[in-house]
Amino acid sequence: MASFDLVLRGGTCVLPWGQEITDVGVREGRIAAIGDLRSAAAANEVDCRGLHVLPGLIDAHVHLRDPGDPAVENLSDGTRAAVLGGLAAVFDMPNTAPSITDRERLDWKRDYLGGRAFCDVGLYVGASMKNIEELASLELQPNVCAVKVFAGSSTGDLLVADDASLEAVMRSGRRRICYHSEDEYRLQARKPEFTSGMPHRNHMIWRDVECAFLGTRRLMALARKTGRPAHILHVSTAEELDYLKDFRDVCTVEVLLNHLTQTDEAYDRLGGYAVMNPPIRDARHMEAAWAAVADGTVDVIGSDHAPHSRAAKERPWPDCAAGLTGVQTIVPLMLDHVNAGRLSLSRLVDLMCAGPARVYGVVGKGRLAAGYDADFTLVDMKKTRTIEESWIVSPCGWTPFAGHRCTGWPVATVIRGGVAMREDEVIGAPQGQAVRFAEARGA
Ligand code: DOR
Ligand code: ZN
């Protein structure tokens, strides 16, 4: 008789080839069987009848604040938030304090995860004006998901703004590079037009459409010239989404939950708690983002989770910190979008599992299939719950989505066969490991 460590019984499984009500058997942390396992023995079972079984969802864009200010968030808090929100893995950005830009800090961070992370973690390495030569070897270090380039300035001190330096970055190494695309020169040139204390909606007027679009046009010209694959993070304008359809040979596309969920009315309602880079814009851009989800332009959806203290968010614009929490809320909000008919559950899995796996070259995750890691997000598509600020476990303690009523909620997170969250409770010690990538060493 077949025996398993864990069997998920009778859930509606979102398989790469369609949805099936079936069982999933797990052995030694990996998927060992998919099919009718009624006659198999199981050391542990989860009754999934009435639930959907998704591959463990991945948020490929989070800024955990470690090293940084633990009163805002540390790695344990941020990954605890992730598993409560139904995520099995996050890819962590390098603009910490200090930033992750060399071998020593990368090695430190990989070691630091052990015993602290509640979910699996992929590591970005940051490009700076000082490490361009080293990027070719840094991107090959174990567990590196990608090099991140801030081509426009945002939180932290990472910036590579000029074409010659960006080209040098593209010629250093081979893997797909992730870009924050806003034109730094236009940002700085227009800043004097604005003064302290102006209404928060000036954020999207300062960092306007042309700022993002110009940044993306410059990056695409350089990507074509060098042949270096690009991934444009948080594409926020209708203009870029239209333009990038002609660059699929060199470019993949990320859109954020925020840009699919919020429009400029948020500035009046939330003040500094609506400020992020690139900015939340008007409804025309949100509609374009949904159209780009529908037609396949978008490869990945992320949260851009970027916590800041309340004090930093409440400073007058433009001195208020840019960035919004999101790692705990992206899954409920996306499930709510599924229930509202804006995308299918299969497309959500494509955007948060298969998409990240393809863009970053993840090993063994992002797919419900035999041999893959036994990572699962179990969701109850009928459960209705309101996002409350008191639920947020990042110490900063706020969410721009407080009061949002969601239909569809993650009820369990399973990581490599271990139940990490069930019914809103984090279970056991932090078991997170570093994610493996095909093109990095040691994969
Ligand atoms: O709004 C943002 N916040 N955009 C970024 O690019 C960085 C992030 C952060 O780290 O605060
Ligand atoms: Zn970001």
Image (cartoon, rainbow, N blue to C red):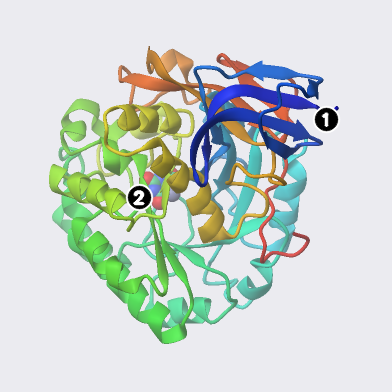
Q: Residue at x 31, y 39 (%)?
A: 343
- The answer to whether the residue bearing label 1 lies less than 8 angstroms from the nearest atom of ligand 2 is no
| Label number found at residue 406 | none
Q: Is residue 87 left or right of residue 409?
A: right
Q: Looking at the picture, which amino acid does disc 2 mark?
A: Val
Residue 359 x, y percent position in the rendering:
51, 60
Q: Residue at x 41, y 26 (%)?
A: 332
Query: Does any portion of residue 275 appear in the rendered image?
Result: no
Task: Characterize the local packing of mark 2: few (<14), some (14-19) or many (20 or more) Cα atoms within 10 angstroms.
Answer: many
- The answer to whether the residue bearing label 2 lies less than 8 angstroms from the nearest atom of ligand 2 is no
Say which residue label 1 marks.
2
Q: Is residue 45 left or right of residue 91?
A: right
Q: Is residue 299 left or right of residue 441?
A: left
Instruction: Classify mark 1: helix, strand or loop.
Output: loop
Of 435 and 338, which appears nearest the observer?
A: 338
Q: Quarter holding the N terminus? A: top right
What whole-number distance in Å separates the C-alpha atoms at marks 1 and 2? 43 Å
Task: Characterize the local packing of mark 1: few (<14), some (14-19) or many (20 or more) Cα atoms within 10 angstroms.
Answer: few
Q: Is residue 325 left or right of residue 214?
A: right
Residue 352 x, y percent position in the rendering:
48, 44
Residue 302 x, y percent position in the rendering:
43, 44
User: Which is nearer the N-term, disc 1 or disc 2?
Assistant: 1
The relative height of residue 229 versus residue 401 in the rendered view (above or below) is below
Query: Nearer the observer, disc 1 or disc 2?
Result: 1
Say which residue label 2 marks.
255
Of 388 and 380, which appears nearest the observer?
A: 380
